[in-house]
Amino acid sequence: MKPRRSTHRSPARFLGRMSEGAKPAPFPGFVEPCGPTPRQHPPSGDGWLHEIKHDGYRFQAHVREGAVALYTSGGNDWTLRMPTIAASVGAVPVNNVILDGELVAVDAKGNAVFYELPSELKARVKAKLVYYAFDLLHLDGFDLRGADLVDRKRVLEALLADAKGMQLIKYVEHIAGNGEAVLDHACKLGLEGIVSKRADAPYRSGKRPEWIKTNCAVA
């Protein structure tokens, strides 16, 4: 899918190429996702970033020379099923990018409603779908997977902040500190749980111990 694109290019691409661990590389295509290891309790101590676990479907969003593609965690192309999300991804002001995130159906208050997601994917108008981006793997000719997570997220936040007027792509915030306190707060809000990630971790495919998933139901 190739939507109309702006000629503006985000200055975040310069932050990306200056990140330690970033390296020039051709566009890799679909990347096997990094997956969290389930644990009963979140990690404690310094060096961890804690994110809200959104109740949705994992998706990888690509822009390659203006062409947009949306892939499931298994590498299946679902671009045509999500035209509104594809259009928003295409509006990100770069030539080439790979985002990792979660596709979530939300209600009128912005709360995730997982049970409605399958019906929204089948619906003709998919206004309730929001893509929560939590990682950045490639940006305009640079592979960022070797950079620290905290650096990748800094570039991602700047990139999405520069994409003005975007409502269907959200940056996933994180909290550094006590994982138990973050999980307790998430559970009190009725959320599914949290994902804790090492701030200095590179992006590696497959299930990784540097990413830990803790659900409220088993905490």
Image (tube, grey):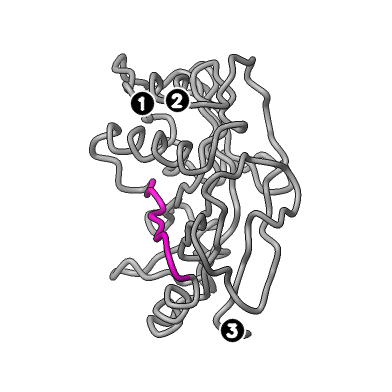
- Would you say the residues marked 2 and 3 are in contact, meaning their CB atoms lie under 8 Å apart? no
Does residue 54 appear to the left or right of 128 in the view shown?
Answer: right
Mark 3 or mark 1: whose residue is earlier in sequence: 1
Judge whether residue 72 can be spotted in this image.
yes
**Vertical side of 216 occupied by 17: above or below:** above
Residue 104 seen by the camera? no
Q: Do the residues labelled 3 and 1 touch (CB within 8 Å)?
A: no
Residue plotted at (59% across, 58% down): 57
Hey, what amino acid is under mark 3? Ala
Expressed as whole percent of the image width and height from the top left, the position of residue 199 reads: 52, 49
Question: Mark 2 — residue?
Answer: 16
Question: Which residue is depicted at the point 55% across and 61% down?
Answer: 196
Q: Give the range drawn in magenta.
A: 169-178
Q: Farthest residue to the front: give it.
A: 45
Q: Residue furthest left?
A: 165
User: Which quadrant of the figure has residue 156?
Assistant: top left
State the image coordinates of residue 6 (x, y, percent, origin top left): 31, 19
